[in-house]
Amino acid sequence: MTTPNIVVFIIVGFVAQMIDGALGMAYGVSSTTFLLSIGIPPAAASASVHAAEVFTSSVSGLSHLRLGNVDKDLVKQLLIPGVIGGISGAYILTAVPASIIKPIVSIYLLVMGLVILRKSFQQVQEKASRNHMFPLGLVGGFFDAIGGGGWGPIVTSTLVATGNHPRFVIGSVNLVEFFVTVCESMTFFLTIGLTHWTIILGLIIGGGIAAPLAAYVCKKLPTRTLMRIVGVLITVLSIRTIYLTLPQ
């Protein structure tokens, strides 16, 4: 199959970053799904997406920080476990397929998506829960590397579902994602290297353009609207992934 030219990857990067920056998830899922569909191997696809995400997540994180969308305590709690999980997942992906793990994660995310949707139609929880932050960051980073995306869906969905404000969750998760992505990319580079430079450059350009716009959208959207969009997105992506893993 002929690889598309760079313009296609710029468009993919722009759309993926608009979704991720505004809703706190799905950059990796969107980009990796497209790359796998054109025949890029899973490890190479994840490596390319994370290499591009080093640049796009830095722009996104700084944009959220400048717009006041970041909770610094939340960033501190997620940073170290996220990095540890990301490095572990990137190393394992180079040797172990993710076909068994994906359905389990998708079922978990489906439940979280439905929980968020339910909460969006109820009174917003006054006291947010931030228990088990270390394992949450660890699992989020691990599956982000394994599946080419998963940091946002796992961490953002769990924190929003447990009553944390969507705007600050999305901004904080995006900022931490930069550090997680840097460590994952370094691991990929040292194990399998980076070769798909047209893909990486296209994703960087598209994502870099979209990141500031997405952060602004996140700030302006009402809390309940954010929760409903996040809930629907997680639910749909999870159902799709579960369906694709079923025997055809």
Image (cartoon, rainbow, N blue to C red):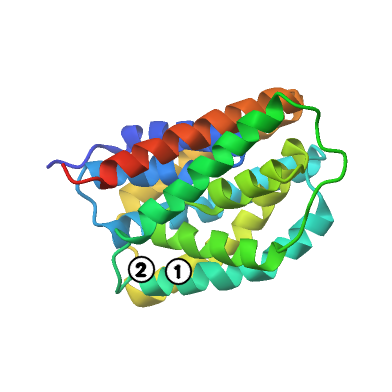
Q: In the drawing, does residue 197 fall left or right of residue 171?
A: left
Name which quarter of the figure residue 118 lies in. Answer: top right
> Which part of the image, by quadrant, shows the C terminus?
top left
Q: Is residue 195 above or below residue 87?
A: above
Q: Which amino acid does label 2 sit on?
A: Leu
Q: Which residue is drawn at 61% across and 41% down?
A: 24
Name which quarter of the figure residue 102 lies in. Answer: bottom left
> Which part of the image, by quadrant, shows the N terminus?
top left
Neighbourhood count class around disc 2 (C-alpha, 10 Å): few under 14, some 14–19, many 20 upward: many
Q: Is residue 228 above or below residue 242?
A: above
Give x and y (percent) for residue 80: 67, 70
In the foreground, 40 or 225: 225
Q: Can residue 188 be seen in this view?
A: yes
Q: Residue 80 carries which label?
A: none
Q: Which amino acid does label 1 sit on?
A: Gly
In the foreground, 155 or 127: 127
Q: In the drawing, does residue 151 fall left or right of residue 169?
A: left
In the foreground, 118 or 14: 118
Give x and y (percent) for residue 115: 62, 37
Give x and y (percent) for residue 125: 82, 37
Q: Residue 89 carries which label?
A: 1
Verify CB contact (< 8 Å) between mark 2 and mark 1: yes
Q: Residue at x 32, y 71 (%)?
A: 94
Give x and y (percent) for residue 148: 41, 54
Q: Is residue 22 visible?
A: no
Say which residue label 2 marks.
93
Q: Which residue is drawn at 63% across and 26% down?
A: 228
What distance separates the C-alpha of mark 2 from that of mark 1? 6 Å
